[in-house]
Each structure stands twice: as C-alpha cells, then as structure tokens.
Image: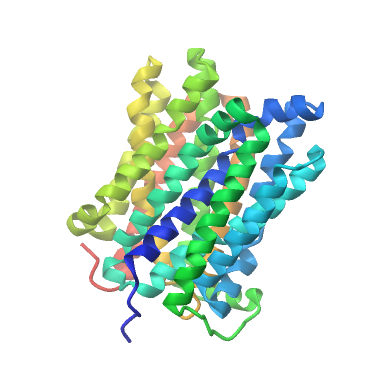
Amino acid sequence: MKPPETRRSTLILLAAAGFVSGASMRASDPLLPTLAAEFGVRVRDAASVLTAFVFAYGMFQIIHGAIGDRFGKLRVVSIAMLFAAVAAGACAFADGLSDLSIYRFLTGMTAGAVIPLSLAFIGDRFAYEGRQAKLGRFIAGTLLGQSMGPLIGGTLSDLFGWRTAFGALGAAFLVVGVLLGREAARDGDHGGARFTPPWQRYGEMLRSARARAVLATVGIEGMLFFGAFGFAGAYLKQRFGLSDSLTGLIIAGFGIGGVAYSVLVPRLVKRLGETGLVGGGGIVLVACFAGLATMPTWIATVPFVVLLGFGFYMLHNTLQVRATEMSPNARGAGVSFFALSLFLGQAVGVTAFGAIMDRFGYPGPFVATGVLLAMLAWLFRRFLKTHPIGKSQA
C-alpha cells in the first residue's frame, strides 16, 4: 500500500520541532553558575535541572510511542510541543531551584516525544530505499538545536537574564507546536493502531532477532560513544589548559560533522549503501578517537572532533533507519524503544567511563573506545548483509 502524500512543509516543521527539542535539552548547560548564584546553592546542586530533564526525556519514551501509534504521530508531536511550551514557560517564573527542576522534568517529559515520533512518522511515509536520506535531513535540525542550545541559552542569559532563555524556549515550542497542529489537521494522521500496553509491544520486539540486534547495537553504541565522548571536553581542558568557551566551541564541532553528514547523506547512501556507511563509520570512529588521544596540540584535535560527528552518524543514522522497521505496524513504539535503549546505554557509559578514566587517564580509554566501536560496526555490517531490507544493500 502506497504511503499517503507528505507535504514538504511537514518535514520542514518536523525539523524545526527537532531543533527546538534539541536546543531545549542543552540550553541550560551554561546557566548552571548563574542559577547557583541566583538560588544560593552549589553548581553541582544546580545541575539538578539537567538531570531532571534528561531523566524524564529518556524514561518517558516507554509511553510516547504507544500514544503516537494510537492517536497519530504528527498530532501527538504537536500536542507534546504545546505542553512543552507551558512547561518551558513555567521555568521562567520558577521561585526556587526545586520548582525549576520540576518544570524542567515536565519539559523533558513532553519534549522527549518529538524526535522519536518524528522519525517514526517519516518511516511511515517513505519507502525504505529513500528513507535514510529523509531521516538524515531531519536530524540536521536536531543537531543544529543541540549545537546551538548552549549558545542560545548563554547569550540570552547574558543579555536579558536567565529567565528570558527559558521564556524564549517556551515561545519557540508554542509557535512550532501550533504550526504542526495545523499541519496535522491537513495531513489526516489520526493513528488508529489498537492500543497495546507498551510492555507487551516491547516484549514482541524482544522476541524478534532483528529487533534485538538493533536494540543491542544502539545500546552498546550509546554506552561506548557517549561514555567516552562525554569526557572529551574535560580531557581537552585539562591537557591543553583551554578556557571553557574554547573547549565548548571545539566540542560543538561534533554537531558540525553531523550536519555535514546530513547534507551529504543522499549521495553517501547511493554510493555506499547501508553496509558501506556502517563500515566506513567504524573506520572513521577508530581513527578519530585515536587522533583525539594522540594529537600534540589542541588545534590539531579540531578536525578529529568534527569527523567524529560525521563518523558517528554514518553508523547511528543507519541504526535509526533499521529502528523504523523493528515494528512496521507500530513504528512509534519501535523507535521509542530504540531511543530508550540508546538512553540507557548512555547512562551506563557515562558512569562506567568516569570510573575508568579516573584510574587510567583519557588517551587509553579513547583509543580502546574507537577499536570497540569499529568492531561493533563490523558486527552490525555483517548483520545488515545477512538481513537485507529493500534494495539499499551495496
């Protein structure tokens, strides 16, 4: 059955929603010292606003997918944006740190629906052969949001106060949510899938060897990559004595690499296919982690950080495409389960790598991470060869 026609404006608005959701995730990062001074607490106590958002964002994936499948993915994304607008706007009026943390929790809970359900919606509307290019373009908005979030939050806070930063996020959620709501009404995406408790749907996927392979791979990928890369800033600052702003600028290069991938992805898919992308991504990752660990000057690490973003999305975007096929009749649940697995892997990775790097330093674990990611990519490449879908294999 041919998918319904999808307007170009719908994809643009979904990319805009991904931008706002990604920016909201990172906008409070540079505000921690300001919030600590405002509320008379330590910086590490102020970090509860980060923890609250990320925890809610990850854990509520277990219900977003089922709701999107039942009531329509585009409709649920638009409604989630409106609720996120209220929660983000409330942050601007918080009287204390506990109130702000609660509002950030609510923002993460609602904003967390945007990216997985958008991926699932694109999976519903485009044939597998052309889906990776569409998903690659969508993630450009998300990456730009995550890269620019700290800049937006820090600049608005410096110019107008920290409350303005959250108020601006609330306004952005509201505008894009309203426009998406109008688009959903035109599109007619009303869902209709019979509601199945999330644990039953997840149980079905865990009984599928194909789904288990994708979930395991993305969980390990998240644990390895984000566990190590989460300490790249600390490594650069300590080894080269860089300022916070310069360190942040270098790390933002990861997003630039990801955006470059999203621009080139149609040609890359055509030339390399899934297996070539995954294999190439593994090679790029091992080379870049080794380069990051061994370069003698900070400026020499910059291209490796940028290429880390490119190589990561060569692997991760292919995983995203496969995630849209884990449960074709309930893609919302499938992609949300994928996002939950990634989130859990990151959580484990940051904790584990923190202990490892305390004991062994940074260079050795960086190199080991690159080698393990290359091995993971090789194993997933073998899986793709033995479990092809459509005509995208090369």
From the viewer's side, name the closer residue of 366 and 140.
Answer: 140
Is residue 80 shown above or below 32?
Answer: below
Return the x and y of residue 329 as percentages of the image width and height: 47, 81
In the displayed structure, does residue 355 sit left or right of residue 127? Answer: right
In the displayed structure, does residue 51 sit left or right of residue 277? Answer: right
Is residue 17 shown above or below 77?
Answer: above
Residue at 77% x, 42% y: name it.
Answer: 94
Is residue 95 shown above or below 274?
Answer: above
Return the x and y of residue 103 as percentages of the image width and height: 73, 49
The answer to whether residue 56 shows anywhere in this view is: no
Extreme top residue here? 241
From the viewer's side, name the closer residue of 162 and 263.
Answer: 162
Return the x and y of residue 23 as percentages of the image width and height: 53, 44
Residue 124's image quarter?
bottom left
Extreme left residue here? 271
Residue at 39% x, 21% y: name it.
Answer: 294
Is residue 191 shown above or below 377?
Answer: below
Scheme by which the image is coloured: rainbow
The answer to whether residue 59 shows anywhere in this view is: yes
Residue at 35% x, 39% y: name it.
Answer: 257
From the viewer's side, name the closer residue of 159 and 285.
Answer: 159
From the viewer's side, name the closer residue of 336 and 222.
Answer: 336
Give the quarter of the figure containing the N terminus. bottom left
Residue at 51% x, 71% y: name it.
Answer: 73
